[in-house]
Image: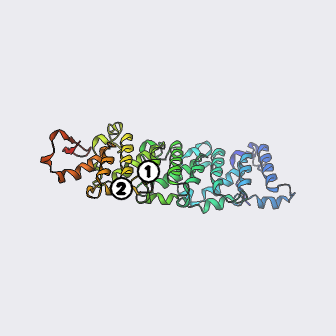
């Protein structure tokens, strides 16, 4: 095995061409400690040990112990192996994961290596498995929410950037800008909060790739549980999912159903008021006859056709005082009753953020 000798561990005296290259004493001690780990008491020859000291074959147990010793030469070799993995070298990695904030140093920081290996450990069938093959065969779309909930808590920046890109590339998934850092990656805090929320509400076994089908598969029970979790990304996702799947889309959502602070922004995200979200879900839950497994999209479609809803259901639905739901019910009832037969005091004029004209509705 050939190791590139990092400049930081070359003895300064080697600037004299008459003196052979020397590795500084502290680094030699660290190398000796690494070799002892690889030998594991078997008293093998140095040549055998150097062959075994291959970063691409180190097990999770060995890798953790080797990184803790922090041989610069070995850390450089591990960095090279990781940088050669296509899944990683195509990422827009930030400079803070490199020694001295310098990607040209050829050294990932000890902290980042430690955190990355700790995160990858959740994918190992056994601690004796080699680390690099796990990285090379990793398919983010096949990772389940429970595993990711554990992995992201290890705070690896590389993993955070990888999952940020994966979420942004998921169909229909829009991330609230306040959940992103200055490099347009999801913050550590928000990433942890999101996967806790997802795992608890959608199930730990759901794979990342399945999130693209969430609109068609999420149930009212799952959505109500998800709504109770704390996550800005989740809040934005729920708002977008509701609005995009309403018959009429944005045109069906009145201004006062949105979050007041969000509306004041120069470019509102489209966050719905939290109380309105809860009222809407309660109304849809009533429509489902308290069926946790009812598909959310089916319920929003059903409520747009009042001819299929019973009087008891209508009573239960409107009693939740959801602005969005009551607007939909009003839109369907008014043509049936006849506008001229509705007392003016029972009507109100409402607007949507994108429409100048007011809409007359039943209060």
Q: Position of residue 78 (x, y in %)?
A: 67, 54
Disc 2 is placed on an element classified as helix
Residue 92 seen anywhere in this rendered image of the structure = no
* Residue at mark 2: 299
In front: mark 2 or mark 1? 2
Q: Position of residue 187 (x, y in %)?
A: 51, 44
Q: Quadrant of the C terminus?
A: top left
Badge number at residue 318: none
Q: How is the image coloured?
A: rainbow
Left or right of residue 302: residue 35: right
Q: Position of residue 96 (x, y in %)?
A: 57, 43
Q: Quadrant of the N terminus?
A: bottom right
Q: Please tell me whether residue 272 is drawn above or below residue 218 in the rendered image.
A: above
Front residue (pair 156, 357): 357
Q: Position of residue 256 (x, y in %)?
A: 29, 40
Q: Residue at x 53, y 42 (%)?
A: 189
Disc with the residue nearer the chain's start (2 vs 1)? 1
Residue 303, quarter of the rendered image: bottom left
Residue 248, quarter of the rendered image: bottom left
Badge number at residue 223: 1
Front residue (pair 36, 237): 237
Front residue (pair 279, 19): 279
Contact flag, marks 2 and 1 (Cβ < 8 Å): no
Left or right of residue 231: residue 285: left
Q: Residue at x 35, y 48 (%)?
A: 283
Residue 249 seen anywhere in this rendered image of the structure = yes
């Amino acid at each position: 095995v050939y190791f590139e000798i990092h400049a930081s561990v070359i003895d300064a005296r080697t600037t004299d061409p008459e003196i052979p290259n020397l590795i500084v004493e502290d680094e030699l001690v660290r190398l000796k400690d690494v070799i002892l780990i690889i030998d594991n008491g078997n008293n093998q020859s140095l040549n055998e040990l150097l062959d075994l000291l291959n970063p691409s074959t180190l097990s999770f147990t060995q890798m953790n112990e080797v990184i803790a010793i922090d041989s610069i030469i070995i850390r450089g070799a591990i960095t090279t192996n990781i940088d050669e993995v296509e899944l990683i070298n195509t990422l827009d990695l930030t400079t803070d994961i490199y020694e001295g904030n310098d990607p040209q140093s050829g050294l990932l920081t000890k902290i980042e290596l430690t955190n990355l290996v700790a995160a990858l450990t959740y994918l190992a069938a056994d601690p004796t498995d080699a680390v690099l093959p796990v990285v090379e065969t990793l398919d983010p779309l096949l990772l389940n929410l429970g595993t990711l909930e554990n992995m992201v808590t290890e705070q690896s920046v590389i993993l955070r950037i990888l999952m940020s890109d994966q979420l942004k590339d998921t169909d229909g998934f829009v991330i609230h800008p306040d959940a992103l850092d200055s490099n347009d990656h999801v913050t550590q805090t928000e990433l942890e909060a999101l996967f806790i929320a997802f795992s608890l509400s959608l199930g730990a076994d759901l794979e990342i790739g399945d999130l693209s089908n969430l609109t068609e598969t999420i149930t009212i029970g799952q959505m109500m549980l998800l709504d109770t979790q704390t996550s800005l990304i989740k809040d934005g996702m729920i708002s977008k999912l509701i609005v995009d799947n309403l018959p009429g889309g944005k045109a069906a959502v009145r201004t006062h159903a949105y979050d007041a602070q969000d509306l004041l922004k120069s470019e509102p995200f489209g966050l719905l008021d939290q109380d309105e979200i809860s009222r809407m879900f309660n109304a849809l839950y009533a429509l489902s006859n308290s069926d946790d497994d009812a598909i959310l999209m089916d319920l929003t479609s059903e409520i747009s056709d009042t001819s299929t809803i019973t009087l008891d259901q209508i009573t239960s639905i409107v009693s939740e005082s959801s602005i969005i739901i009551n607007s939909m019910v009003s839109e369907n009832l008014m043509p049936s009753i006849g506008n001229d037969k509705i007392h003016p005091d029972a009507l109100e004029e409402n607007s949507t953020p994108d429409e100048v004209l007011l809409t007359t509705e039943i209060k």
